Amino acid sequence: MINKEALVREYLPYIKKIAYDLKRNLPHNVEVDDLVQEGLVAFLQAIEKFDPKKGAKLRSYLLTRVKGAMYDYLRKIDWMPKNLRHDIKLVEDAIVNMESDSNDIDFEKIAKITNLPIENVKRAYNELTRKQLLMLDSYISDDSELIDKIASDENPYSYAINELLKEQLIEAIKKLDDKEQLLLSLRFEHELSLKEIGKVLNVTESRVSQLLAKTLAKLKKYLGGE
């Protein structure tokens, strides 16, 4: 029989780490404590539902469900006002369509293209980066081998859709250059922070943010995102 209290004591540091990692890409009004609370609730529910016969490892199963619950919570609270969403769309389109071999983000040029004040461009860019990181991180987490196993048992249709999306994502990533693929690998495969990636690439944290923003915008375009 599973000892819930012992598991909570053992996994609470991991739950908090997931929450703090997510918080790095979130605005100030999102509280870490709320993320931890959502994670704990999902953790306890996952313990009840865990079935080792499905072939999933307990640790992977529990932490995947925790992370999924935190993403569900973020989708529910939806912190972005409508006007900011509009600005983000304009800025994202400008970044993708600007004719430049450089990965530098030229805020003044984007302001001219979008007819937005430069303060609006910078705010939209910051929120765009957060949104992109969270969306791809959530997608990759939801598209893990574990979730595939669960989906195949509980909802075959969802499993088929996930498999198709996975193939499309792999093909889209192949279209990126080596540096862009390395960035994605460091951020989402090795789960390094922007600061840690900066140390690996010998660039500033803000530079990493710029490179990721453009890379993720390109990836979205390759995937046919609007």
Image: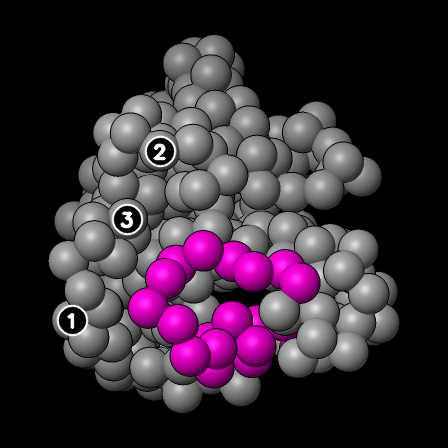
| Disc 1 and disc 2 in contact, CB within 8 angstroms | no
Q: Residue at x 47, y 82 (%)?
A: 97
Distance Cα–Cα, label 1 vs label 2: 24 Å
For the magenta stretch, what is the residue range?
A: 90-108
Of residues 114 and 130, the one nearer the viewer is 114
Residue 39 visible here: no
Give the mark, 1 or 2, whose residue is nearer the N terminus.
1
Q: Give the SS element for disc 3.
A: helix
Residue ID for mark 2: 203
Q: Is residue 226 above or below residue 162?
A: below
Is 99 a magenta residue? Answer: yes
Distance Cα–Cα, label 3 vs label 1: 13 Å
Disc 3 crowd rating (10 Å Cα; few below 14, some 14-19, many 20+) is many
Q: Residue at x 39, y 59 (%)?
A: 103
**Percent x, y of residue 192:** 34, 33
Residue ID for mark 1: 174
| Disc 3 and disc 1 in contact, CB within 8 angstroms | no
When asked about the image quadrant of residue 52, the answer is top left
Residue type at mark 3 is Leu
Q: Give the SS element for disc 2.
A: loop
Q: Is residue 92 above or below residue 62?
A: below
| Disc 3 and disc 2 in contact, CB within 8 angstroms | no
Residue ID for mark 3: 183
- From the viewer's perspective, is the residue at label 1 or at label 2 nearer? 2
Residue type at mark 2 is Val
